[in-house]
Amino acid sequence: MAEAAMDWTVNKNLSDAGPVLKIEEVAVAYKVRHGEIVAVQNVSFEIKRGESYGIVGESGCGKSTVAWAIVNFLGANGYVKAGSIKFLGQDLVGKTGEELRKLRGDQIAMVYQDPMQALNPSMKLGDQMKEVLTVHRGMSDADAAKRCIEMLDRVYMPDAANVMKRYPHQISGGQQQRVVIAMALLNNPALLIMDEPTTALDVTVEAAVLDLIAELRRDFDTAIMYITHNLGVVARVCNRVGVMYAGEMVERGTVEQIFKKPQHPYTQGLMRCVPKLGADKASSMLYPIIGRVPPPRNRPIGCIFNPRCDYTQDRCIEERPQLRDMPNGVSVRCHFAGEIDPAQWTPPEELKLPSISGGDGDNGEAEPILTVNGLKKYYPVQGSSLKDLLGRGPKRYVKAVEDATFSVKKGKTLGIVGESGCGKSTLIKTLIGLEESTAGEAQFLGFDITGDLSTRNKQLIQELQMVFQNPDSTMNPSYSVGQQIGRPMIRFGTVPKNQVRDEVIKLLQAMRLGENYYDRLPRQLSGGEKQRVGIARALASSPNVVLCDEPVSALDVSVQAAILNLLLDVQAESGTTMIFIAHDLSVVRFFSDDVAVMYLGQIMEIGPADAIYAPPYHPYTEALLSAVPIPDPTIQQKHIRLEGNVPSAISPPSGCRFHTRCPRRHLLPNNGKICEEELPPWREIGDGHRIFCHIPLETLRTFDPIITQKEED
Amino acid sequence: MLVKDCMTRHPIMISPETPAAEAQKIMAENQIRHLPVVGSGKRLLGLITRQRLSLKPDELGSLNIWEISRRLSAMTAKKIMLKAEHVQTIIPDKTVERAARIMTDHKVGCLPVLEDGIVVGILTETDLLKSFQTMLGLPADGVRVTVRMPGGVGIFKQVIVAISEEGWPILGLGSFPTRKQPGYWDSVFKIAGVNIDEVEAVINQVPNQEIVDIREVV
């Protein structure tokens, strides 16, 4: 206790050496044909040495614009209109291109969301990394190579020397991001700007990258500006946070202050959008923020948040609030900050919330609508040797789904989680008939659905529908919304032709989209609206089962909350059965009745949602849970990190597929030799909860819960 | 404590082309007295201190008023800096006392910290004074006691044992030979979460020592 207090005072006393980055009242504008658009205004914050500063907000709030302004990547028509950006005491606004170029190389580094775009695909990784040192520092090739390998080791890249000789496509996404981070750190920058660096990565990889960032910050004293929309990530890596909305900073303070007592209505709204890990749909509710971020041209005159705010008064509409310092050290841009108590908040009337019955009452006895038994999906792989070409080589397969066995009851939701490449999507593609299954049984209402679409009759197709992850690539850009939704109705003849339009409009209204959306084209919709249309299309044929493949992963938190509510509503109203894939464990927990955890094509654990999220766990589930970033700094998570990558599905590990990465193997005699040799047994826990592991249940039960509440000081 | 533990990383630096006037402004605004001048890749080229910015009076006298302004406007960091070969530097793996020694020997106020000729930090008098404070546990509240004892490990060990047996955390520790009393050492302990009487009672159990100073510091 005393020691903890001491650390704090010591740090406070010694870190007063001026900020690395100081941004004051910055406004960024883009020149366009009709004058100019002010994208960002009145943004001020500072980042000290060794501090990581989080910037959060929905998309379109100007988070990235601020980052671009720092390094002057605003493009030909963008410029910093007002304010000053001071980096290490020198003003960056007005610096010439050459000076900035030098600074960027030497002192400021950036890491972006998609590592593949930051790496040159035609150059070996080693050459790309060495270039940083040989060009900027004039280092010799051999010295540069040595230093690059050191840095790769530093970011825990396995077999660093070998990675130097590879091309970007030969390593996995998580490894690519590590290479980019290593490259950014080669010159020991004073400021590291990270723009959604882990958004494209799996939770397990994300957790490892976040650990790495925290460690590097300590060791190199680098100031980090961390841009993300994920509140959980901010809670894990940042010291202080700035919340941005529509180009303004609306609240800033330390992570503890913001999460414990958000004061701006927008921040409070964001917190209500995110499902807490451990919360389910019966006991808690998501409250999306109504409306959406106004485009820069149409920002209101008064408080920019007033059209979406639940506390709007006349003053908010007339007068723009200033960023005010609150007594507890937080700055809030709201006239009524301090007077608003989030605990007193009640959902506004126009917010339609799903009526959740929790599925009680008639559950339990409900008939399984979909039963899958030992389903397998193998993809043949063509080798490149002559023997293979002649068809005489040994046949090899990618075993994408192995022995999937489960059943889904009517009106229930089965969630499927797992890292990318674990066969989640293949499983549902097989169910819906986009792929033919290799072996096993799958029955839907007594009909066999192991074949692909060509073997199914129209009715079967009508009853099984799918919502895809990316609405952009699954909608025909030249068909209007109405046509897209109406098409399945006409195809399946569920609605008489002359009533299609009315039915479509009814569906659109159920999706909270107005009639005026009927004639719009997909490009005229926002991401959330497109996903609603995607859902409407899946529901158009009034199917019994809807398969959702990551339907909310690409969306902002408030939109995500709205879509989840919508799906819940649909389910409650028409008793639709759903299979829901997501990589976000808190979303799956919130949305599903049952959860299946997949690893490398194999279901590792399956059971009721609340049983999956508490011990006994499968060791893999345990690792996944420990990796989820939780938007609550008072929660303590056990630290379990998986090493290495998901092995190749062409030659999956013998015995238990997870044995190469299992952190719990040592619990078995002989360091888990049995895991390498034999397939584990299914261990039944009751209530349909099964775990696929050699470790006896008694031992699994002794694991501590992953998530515990930190003790209050 | 090593240089890398107390140096300031990512110091403010300028390029050789920066006008002297701007260098002066940067120093004034950020309240710093030393400004390393670096080339591409943060390679150290020189150092600007407050003295380098002042014109020598005899030189000043020989110029007329027009020449002064012309001279000043043409002045860049490169022209006024102390060249790298004359700058005392240090590497991150040296000890703080070594760094302090170099600074007192050469009467300089700062040492750029280099790794392969690249500036990775700067160590100034301020940094050293800060590390001095941390070593004696200044930033936290507690009791600071100075114990005088004859040289040799015996008594020092007994004092340490007596304190740790109470479970008290020692936040800072310093030991030095007593002035004008050869063979004797003064040791300063900074202990948190206790009061003077408790400390006195515990230390007085140890024979052959003398508490020369005890006070509560906040």
Image: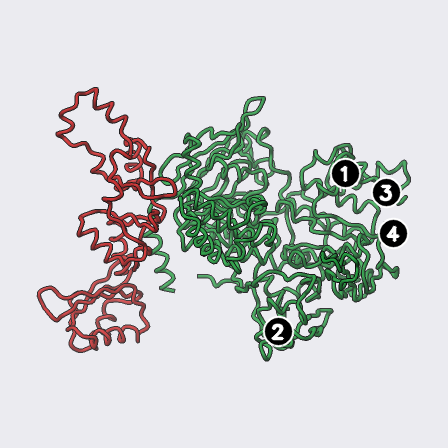
Residue A522 visible somewhere in the drawing: yes
Which chain is painted in green? A
| Same chain check for tags 4 and 3 | yes
Question: Few, some or many C-alpha atoms within 10 Å of disc 3 (few <14, some 14-19, many ≥20)?
Answer: many
Number of marks present in the image shown: 4
Q: Chain of mark 4?
A: A
Q: Chain of mark 3?
A: A
Q: Distance from label 1 to label 2 (Cα)?
A: 49 Å
| Same chain check for tags 3 and 1 | yes
Q: Looking at the picture, which amino acid does disc 4 mark?
A: Ser
Q: Distance from label 3 to label 2 (Cα)?
A: 50 Å
Return the residue found at the far top. B66
| Same chain check for tags 1 and 2 | yes
Q: Relative to the observer, which residue lies in front, A554 or A173?
A: A173
Q: Residue at left 73%, top 69%?
A: A688
- Mark 1, residue position: A476
- Mark 3, residue position: A489
Return the residue found at the far front. A386
Q: Distance from label 4 to label 3 (Cα)?
A: 20 Å
Which chain is painted in red? B
Q: Tell me which corner region of the image, top left, top right, bottom left or bottom right, holds residue A519.
A: top right
User: The residue tagged with tag 4: helix, strand or loop?
Assistant: helix
Q: Distance from label 3 to label 1 (Cα)?
A: 17 Å
Q: Relative to the observer, which residue lies in front, A639 or A572?
A: A639
Residue A267 visible somewhere in the drawing: no
- Mark 2, residue position: A700
Q: Looking at the picture, which amino acid does disc 3 mark?
A: Met
Question: Few, some or many C-alpha atoms within 10 Å of disc 1 (few <14, some 14-19, many ≥20)?
Answer: some
